[in-house]
Image (cartoon, rainbow, N blue to C red):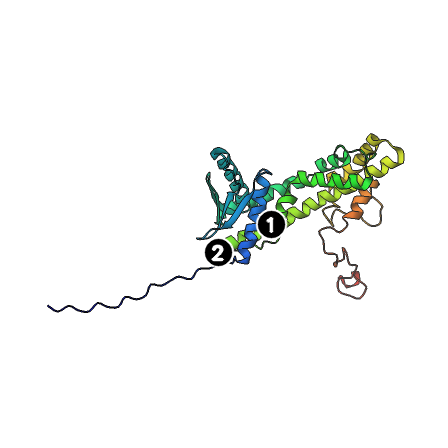
């Protein structure tokens, strides 16, 4: 009986071992920062949040604490984080152990568009901001300098608006998608966010100007209630019209001043602070054609 010789066995391959951390793509790193900011805002102060890349794609978020968190508390927290993260436009999956942040979702992006549009409608009303600004958020100008009172009033109103903080969480993150319909939605979202940011800035300008006007009048006669009442009365006509702060060229009074209503201190300061807001500063409001040029009265048949 003949026995065939055994074939030689190939040496076993040894896979190389990567020592160190796996490099993360810049866009993934930026996404991690955004998700971490959002989840940190939602989580209690005593909890640390971990964010890492998910091998198939996306991110995973977990509660990074030495002591385990109760199952019910962990479930609630992960779902709260999922709700806030999904408002940016990502599809999320959550359970008691972790939160998965996956790719862009058309449904979530449509929801963000509706949310931003609703925010713009709410920000078109300046009445509540004016009332809070003249109240100085309960502060007394005698307790601290006027500049600190104005800064604290502005910061308090900024927190109440909520949008500035949420938009700041997206700083440094360029959103994009390879799918055309998602890219169009992202462009619409970014455009609406810019409008919301501009509207919030108008509210903050008004808060700063009105609070400063209250402090100035209070310094004259030391009657805080009178100062608040006078500044609010002066600004109410402007608040309802809200044409100057929106930069509406059609609603601005003519330069002749014939039918222009008297402007009080607060209105003058607001108009000076936000003049030409939202319009191109390089484009004149009106150009009067000279004689002999197209468009002049002499060329009109």
> Badges 1 and 2: C-beta atoms under 8 Å apart?
no
Q: Residue at x 17, y 69 (%)?
A: 4
Mark 1 to mark 2 CA distance (whole Å): 21 Å
**Residue 244 relative to residue 65: left or right:** right
Q: Is residue 89 above or below residue 235?
A: below
Q: Residue furthest left?
A: 1
Q: Earlier in the sequence, mark 1 or mark 2?
A: 1
Front disc: 1 or 2: 1
Question: Label 2, on which residue?
Answer: 179
Question: Helix or strand or loop: what does disc 2 sit on?
Answer: loop
Residue 147 numbered tag: none
Residue 170 numbered tag: 1
Residue 150 visible to the viewer: yes
Q: Residue furthest right?
A: 220
Question: Helix or strand or loop: what does disc 1 sit on?
Answer: loop
Q: Nearer the viewer, residue 48 or 38?
A: 48
Q: Nearer the viewer, residue 194 or 40?
A: 40
Q: Quadrant of residue 236?
A: top right
**Residue 9 relative to residue 171: left or right:** left
Residue 279: where, in percent of width, then height? 72, 53
Q: Is residue 122 above or below residue 51?
A: above
For mark 1, does the 10 Å Cα neighbourhood hold few (<14), some (14 to 19), or many (20 or more) residues?
some
Residue 263 visible to the viewer: no
| Rendered-image quadrant of the C terminus | bottom right
Residue 2: where, in percent of width, then height? 12, 69
Residue 102: where, in percent of width, then height? 48, 49
| Rendered-image quadrant of the N terminus | bottom left
């Amino acid at each position: 009986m003949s026995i065939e010789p055994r074939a030689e066995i190939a040496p076993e391959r040894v896979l190389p071992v990567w020592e160190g951390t796996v490099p993360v793509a810049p866009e993934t790193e930026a996404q991690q920062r955004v998700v971490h900011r959002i989840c940190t805002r939602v989580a209690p102060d005593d909890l640390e949040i971990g964010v890492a890349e998910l091998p198939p794609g996306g991110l995973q978020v977990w509660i990074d604490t030495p002591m385990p968190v109760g199952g019910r508390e962990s479930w609630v927290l992960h779902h709260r984080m999922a709700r806030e993260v999904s408002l940016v436009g990502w599809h999320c999956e959550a359970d008691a152990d972790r939160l998965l942040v996956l790719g862009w979702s058309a449904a979530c992006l449509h929801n963000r568009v509706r949310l931003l549009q609703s925010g713009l409608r709410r920000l078109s009303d300046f009445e509540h901001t004016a009332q809070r600004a003249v109240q100085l958020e309960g502060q007394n100008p005698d307790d601290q300098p006027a500049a600190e009172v104005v800064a604290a009033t502005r910061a308090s109103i900024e927190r109440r608006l909520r949008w500035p903080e949420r938009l700041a969480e997206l700083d440094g993150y360029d959103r994009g998608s390879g799918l055309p319909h998602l890219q169009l939605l992202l462009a619409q979202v970014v455009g609406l966010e810019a409008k919301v940011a501009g509207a919030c800035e108008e509210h903050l300008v008004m808060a700063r100007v009105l609070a400063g006007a209250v402090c100035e009048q209070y310094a004259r006669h030391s009657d805080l209630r009178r100062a608040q009442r006078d500044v609010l009365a002066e600004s109410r006509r402007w608040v309802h019209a809200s044409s100057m702060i929106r930069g509406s060229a059609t609603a601005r009074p003519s330069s002749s001043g014939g039918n222009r209503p008297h402007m009080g201190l607060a209105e003058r300061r607001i108009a000076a602070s936000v003049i030409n807001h939202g319009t191109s500063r390089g484009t004149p409001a009106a150009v009067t054609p000279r004689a002999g040029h197209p468009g002049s009265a002499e060329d009109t048949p």
